[in-house]
Amino acid sequence: MAKIIDGKAYAEGLRGRIGKAVAALMSEHGLTPGLAVVLVGEDPASKVYVANKAKQTVEVGMNSWEHKLPADTPEKDLLALVEKLNNDPAVHGILVQLPLPGHIDSTKVLTAISPAKDVDGFHVVNVGKLSTGQDSLVPCTPVGSVMLAKDVLGKLDGLEAVVIGRSNIVGKPVAQLLLAENCTVTIAHSKTKDLPAVVRRADLVIAAVGRPEMVKGDWLKPGATVIDVGINRIERDGKGKLVGDCDYASCEKVAGAITPVPGGVGPMTIACLLYNTVKAACAAKGIPQPEM
Ligand code: NAD
């Protein structure tokens, strides 16, 4: 039976350390990190995410601003708000919640965010810095996934890592982080041939596909560590249920350690957003980043 990687507990501990760092930044440097979140429209899932982000931001002692705009907001008005936040010295992190309504060009909006305040790590400048090994703001879910892998495995040097999925949000940045940790990284995707054979090579599997319970236990090398990023809502026994991209029941019998869904990678994302906001605030003030 695999060890269960408790992302909820790890995220709680991380938020506690962030709270302590924020208190020290206030008392020693008069700095209160601040995060502005922009929501356009009424997408129910996005509303829940934004509310949770704001709540957890306040809980660790940081400033939080929520900008809620109607779904028919013209692109130029959103760009004007981003520009205003870019120029506001109290705002250290800007997050524009995706997806944006169809009439708005997401790439244009994400590129308008100052790279120094891009706490989602989606700006091309931060993507370029990550891929060239420079210090940067890195997407939150990949950072959280690698934190959990390191917590259970210690050093990742030399491990065979297989990342399933090549999105800009998860797959590609997590692969870059694993490369920086000296893993031998394979990125698998929808056109990969014989995916089970590729996955079977892995000491560390990161699944970020968006297909419920796709990865089966008999795809795994015995003892492999499985980080399941997928969050999929399915109907089972007449009830709604959240499941990952890995078939937990069969994978936990073969894996050495595995993240559950929910309670694995999911809680890490907001904690890492707060982490990135502290990092951005310290960089803006020209002071070293505290231990978190
Ligand atoms: P995406 O749809 O952008 O990318 C999915 C990737 O999976 C693609 O690169 C595609 O090539 C690959 N893929 C699709 N079908 C495949 C197949 N049959 N075999 C192999 N690869 C296949 O999705 P995403 O944004 O990267 O998200 C992936 C999953 O992670 C989703 O379930 C999403 O909900 C979840 N997610 C969770 C968090 C979180 O925990 N907070 C954050 C982001 C995404």
Image (cartoon, rainbow, N blue to C red):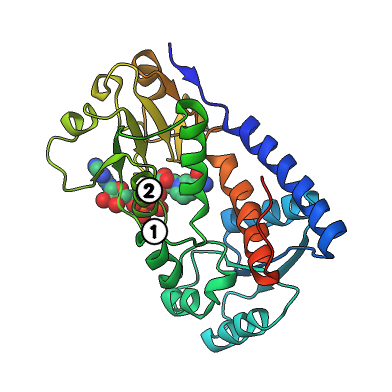
Q: Viewer-proximal residue, 27 or 95?
A: 27
For residue 30, above or below residue 263: below
- Left or right, 193 with reference to 31: left
* Residue 23 seen in this snapshot: yes
Q: Is mark 1 within 8 Å of ligand 1?
A: no
Identify the secondary structure beneath mark 2: helix
Residue 51: image x %, image y %?
Answer: 70, 55
For residue 183, above or below residue 190: above
Q: Which quarter of the picture shows residue 97?
A: bottom right
Identify the secondary structure beneath mark 1: loop
- Left or right, 150 with reference to 225: right
**Tag 2: amino acid:** Ala
Q: Viewer-proximal residue, 103 or 255?
A: 255
Q: Residues within 10 Å of mark 1 (few under 14, many from 20)?
A: few
Q: Viewer-proximal residue, 48 or 143?
A: 143
Residue 11: image x %, image y %?
Answer: 63, 38
**Tag 1: amino acid:** Gly
User: Which residue was labeled with disc 2?
Assistant: 180
Q: Are the residues tagged 2 and 1 within 8 Å (C-beta)?
A: yes
Q: How crowded is mark 2: few (under 14 residues within 10 Å), some or many (20 or more)?
A: some
> Residue placed at 66% from the left, 79% from the top?
85
For residue 123, above or below residue 234: below
How far is the residue under mark 2 from the one under mark 1? 7 Å
The mark found on residue 114 in the picture is none
> Residue placed at 36% from the left, 38% from the top?
207
Residue 69: image x %, image y %?
Answer: 65, 75
Q: Viewer-proximal residue, 35 or 250?
A: 35
Q: Which quarter of the picture shows residue 76?
A: bottom right
> Residue placed at 80% from the left, 65% from the top?
31
User: Which residue was labeled with disc 1?
Assistant: 133
Query: Which residue of the protein is positioned furthest toward the left in this rendering?
Result: 193
> Residue placed at 52% from the left, 30% from the top?
151
